[in-house]
Image (spheres, rainbow, N blue to C red):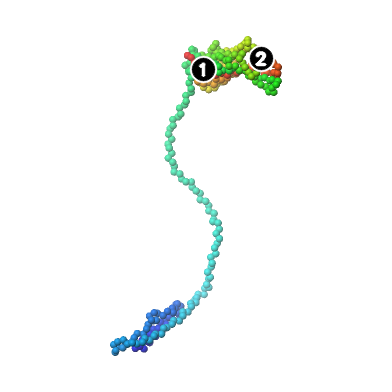
């Protein structure tokens, strides 16, 4: 019986070795490990059925079969093996230029446009009023009077050339001895019997005492003819009614008496009107001979222009009466 078991174990081992050899020939990897069931198989104790018990039998060791080393597999393909290629880094160039995308302006939500409201037109400022511009004065009994005051100045100018002076010089003499008035009726006509301007000549004074003395004693002879008078006849170009504001250029016609001689003359007037009065300048030019006077002749006086300019600077209130 023991001999039979030994033969069976040996046959099993031979069968396993043959199986491993067959796998190696087929190209499969072979393992050198022996199956654990076979490697650990040991002889079982023989039981004698006649004795009815287990007998102490020394187990016979089973020889272990060693597997043959697996043959190295050789490539079966004739295709040559391509060695792996090493990737070469390509230097990075500048990025391609891109066309800028036009930016659309931001959309602004329309604001609530306020509805324009009608504004009241500014009220025109009425022109200033004054009593002397009242239309009710346009009647024969009405009077508008311009009174000359101490704010008025009478003046003369004469161009002269002295030996000790290189350039010509204007000899200027002034006086504040001015009086008179200018009266208009309701139609704007001058009331000639009441319209007169008087200038005192004896008080004329310049920047040269010698000149002043010469004028009083020789030229004007103010001891005999102390006054210059202008009797006004009309004022062509002056607006009527007399305005309360603005500037106007017009003329003043009248009879002028100087040095005992009376001559009709026309003055130029530039007048600024205001609600309470007027101010302005009257001027006129004439030669010495007009009033029978001779050009001055003095030592060191080389020449005198034969042209006298008279000026009347005035500032006068205006009064109106019915």
In the rendered structure, the answer to whether residue 118 lies left or right of residue 87 reads: left
Q: Depth-wise, is mark 2 or mark 1 nearer the camera?
A: 2
Q: With 21 as the anchor, is 283 left or right in this view?
A: right
Is residue 42 visible in the rendered structure shown here? yes
Q: For mark 2, what is the residue? A: 214
- Residue 82 in the image, given as x and y percentages of width and height: 53, 71
At x 67%, y 22%, the residue is: 168
Relative depth, front residue between 94 and 41:
41
- List the residue tagged with mark 1: 318
**Residue furthest to the front:** 209
Q: Answer above or below: position of 14 versus 191.
A: below
Mark 1 secondary-structure assignment: strand
Distance from the alpha carbon under mark 2 to that under mark 1: 38 Å
User: Dividing the image into 4 quarters, which one contains the N terminus?
Assistant: bottom left
Quadrant for residue 38, please give it. Answer: bottom left
Question: Which residue, as the protein is rendered here, is positioned at the far bottom?
Answer: 50
Picture quadrant of residue 152: top right
């Amino acid at each position: 019986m023991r001999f039979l078991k030994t033969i069976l174990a040996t046959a099993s081992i031979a069968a396993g070795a043959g199986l491993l050899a067959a796998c190696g020939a087929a190209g499969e990897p072979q393992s050198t490990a022996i199956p654990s069931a076979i490697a650990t198989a040991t002889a079982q104790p023989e039981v004698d059925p006649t004795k009815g018990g287990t007998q102490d039998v020394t187990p016979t060791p089973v020889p272990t079969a060693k597997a043959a080393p697996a043959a190295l597999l050789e490539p079966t393909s004739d295709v040559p093996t391509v060695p792996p290629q090493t990737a070469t880094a390509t230097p990075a160039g500048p990025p391609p230029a891109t066309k800028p995308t036009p930016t659309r302006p931001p959309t602004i939500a329309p604001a609530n446009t306020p509805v324009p409201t009608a504004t009241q037109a500014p009220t025109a400022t009425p022109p200033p009023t004054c009593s002397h511009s009242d239309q009710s004065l346009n009647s024969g009994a009405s009077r508008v009077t311009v009174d000359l005051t101490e704010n008025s100045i009478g003046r003369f100018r004469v161009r002269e050339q002295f030996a000790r002076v290189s350039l010509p010089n204007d000899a200027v003499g002034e006086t504040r001895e001015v009086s008179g008035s200018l009266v208009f009726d309701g139609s704007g006509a001058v009331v000639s019997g009441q319209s007169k301007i008087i200038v005192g000549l004896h008080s004329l004074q310049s920047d040269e005492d010698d000149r002043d003395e010469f004028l009083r004693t020789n030229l004007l002879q103010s001891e005999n003819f102390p006054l210059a008078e202008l009797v006004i006849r009309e004022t062509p170009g002056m607006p009527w009614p007399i305005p309360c504001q603005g500037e106007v250029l017009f003329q003043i016609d009248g009879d002028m008496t100087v040095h005992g001689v009376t001559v009709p003359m026309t003055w130029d007037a530039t007048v600024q009107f205001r609600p309470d009065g007027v101010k302005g300048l009257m001027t006129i030019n004439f030669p010495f001979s007009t009033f029978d006077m001779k050009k001055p002749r003095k030592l060191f006086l080389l020449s005198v222009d034969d042209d006298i300019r008279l000026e009347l600077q005035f500032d006068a209130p205006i009064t109106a009466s019915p």
